[in-house]
């Protein structure tokens, strides 16, 4: 890591491989869902939403994840 700032280090780790960035299961589930929405939106099934609920995301949080992912994909796509 080039920067000693812990937040910068975490951001770099997440960018490199969020599965190995020492995140909570809840955070990883959110990122997997966002990744699926970005890379294969037509195949993002309800099971992803159920998994998000199972790890503690509320319906309003899931809507936020969808909106943020959609905006990010639109702006960078």
Image (tube, grey):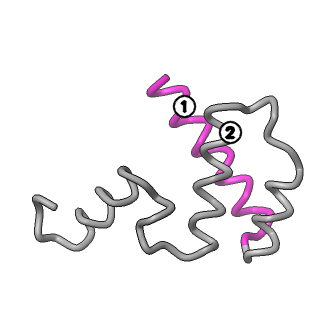
Q: Main secondary structure of the magenta part?
A: helix
Q: Say if the magenta span includes residue 67.
A: yes
First in sequence: mark 2 vs mark 1: 2
Name the residue: 66% across, 54% down. Answer: 64
- Residue found at the far front of this picture: 20
Give the structural element (helix, strand or loop) at label 1.
helix
Residue named by callout 1 = 73
Which residue is at the front of the view, 36 or 64?
Answer: 36
Q: Say if the magenta span includes residue 29.
A: no
Name the residue: 46% across, 58% down. Answer: 18
- Locate residue 4: give its quadrant: bottom left
Residue named by callout 2 = 37
For the residues labelled 2 and 1, say whether their Cβ atoms are less than 8 Å apart.
yes
Magenta part of the chain: 57-77
Q: Total marks drawn?
A: 2
- Residue found at the far top of this picture: 77
Image height of 21 relative to 12, above or below: below
Residue 3 vs residue 14: left or right? left
- The local crowd at label 1, few if under 14, some if 14 to 19, many if 20 or more residues have their Cα within 10 Å, is some
Of discs 2 and 1, which sits in the foreground? 2
């Amino acid at each position: 890591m080039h920067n000693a700032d812990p937040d910068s280090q975490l951001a770099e780790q997440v960018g490199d491989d969020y599965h190995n960035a020492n995140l909570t299961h809840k955070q990883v589930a959110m990122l997997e869902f966002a990744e699926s929405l970005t890379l294969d939106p037509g195949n993002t099934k309800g099971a992803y939403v159920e998994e998000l609920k199972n790890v503690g995301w509320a319906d309003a949080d899931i809507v936020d994840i969808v909106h943020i992912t959609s905006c990010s994909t639109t702006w960078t796509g």
